[in-house]
Amino acid sequence: MPHHYSYKILGYYPPQKSGIGTYGFHIHLERDFARKALSTEMPEILHERMQQAGRAIISNSKLAHKKPSRYEKVFYFVENEGKPTLLLQYCQVPGNACDLGMDVDDIKRLQEEIRNGKNFDSIMNWIEYGPHNVDNIPQAYSLLSAWLHWQEYSIHLISPENH
């Protein structure tokens, strides 16, 4: 039985010309997966394990020398009634506001879809995570590694039948 992936990575390759913000890439996450993640509360122990893993990714990518104390928190999750859900809003790594995240309007639409029990955006069956100030390969690597780590953890809680 073929494995079903809930995401697609776009543009993760070296740029034609190196420069500020040129190492960005996008990830499309299936909308249904995003709704399920938004409807699932983040276990506290998983939240701490995710942050530990994020710090390890930064350390292993040699980015830790850039303001390490500022990056105690790598993953930021969408909250529901003041509690974090499994839906990743963005992840950040050392740099000049370097992150990979989803648009706040996408979060609002997902919340409305959950409240109303239907998909309002039938044309776009995915949510996009976009880059901000990804200036070099270590930043791109760290962001992709962090995002994939989140996805791997969350898919086991959201869709255990696929694993």
Image (tube, rainbow, N blue to C red):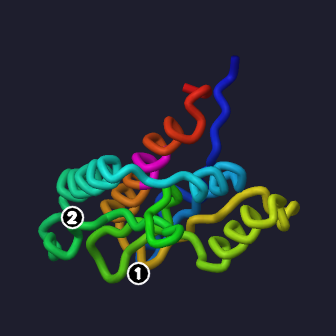
Identity of the residue drawn at 44% across and 63% down: 84
Q: Is residue 147 left or right of residue 137?
A: right
Residue under label 2: 63
Q: Is residue 54 above or below residue 106?
A: above
Q: Secondary structure at mark 1?
A: loop
Q: Which residues are magenta?
A: 147-151
Q: Is residue 48 left or right of residue 37?
A: left
Residue 126 visible to the viewer: yes
Q: Is residue 9 magenta?
A: no
Q: Amino acid at mark 1?
A: Ile
Say which of marks 1 and 2 sits in front: 2
Residue 16 visible to the viewer: no
Identity of the residue drawn at 28% across and 48% down: 49
Identity of the residue drawn at 35% across and 61% down: 137
Residue under label 1: 20
The image's mark for residue 86 is: none
Image coordinates of residue 130 in percent, x first then y, are: 56, 69
Q: Is residue 8 left or right of residue 155?
A: right
Quadrant hosting residue 115: bottom right
Q: Secondary structure at mark 2?
A: loop
Distance of mark 1 from mark 2, alpha carbons? 16 Å
Image coordinates of residue 68 in percent, x first then y, are: 15, 70
Image coordinates of residue 109 in percent, x first then y, are: 72, 72
Please report contact status of discs 1 and 2: CB closer than 8 Å, yes or no: no
In the depicted view, which residue is nearer to us: 4 or 79? 79
> Which quadrant is the N terminus positioned in?
top right
For label 2, count other residues whose C-alpha is less than 10 Å away and answer few (under 14), some (14-19) or many (20+). Answer: some
For label 1, count other residues whose C-alpha is less than 10 Å away and answer few (under 14), some (14-19) or many (20+). Answer: few
In the depicted view, which residue is nearer to us: 48 or 142? 48
Q: Is residue 106 above or below residue 5?
A: below
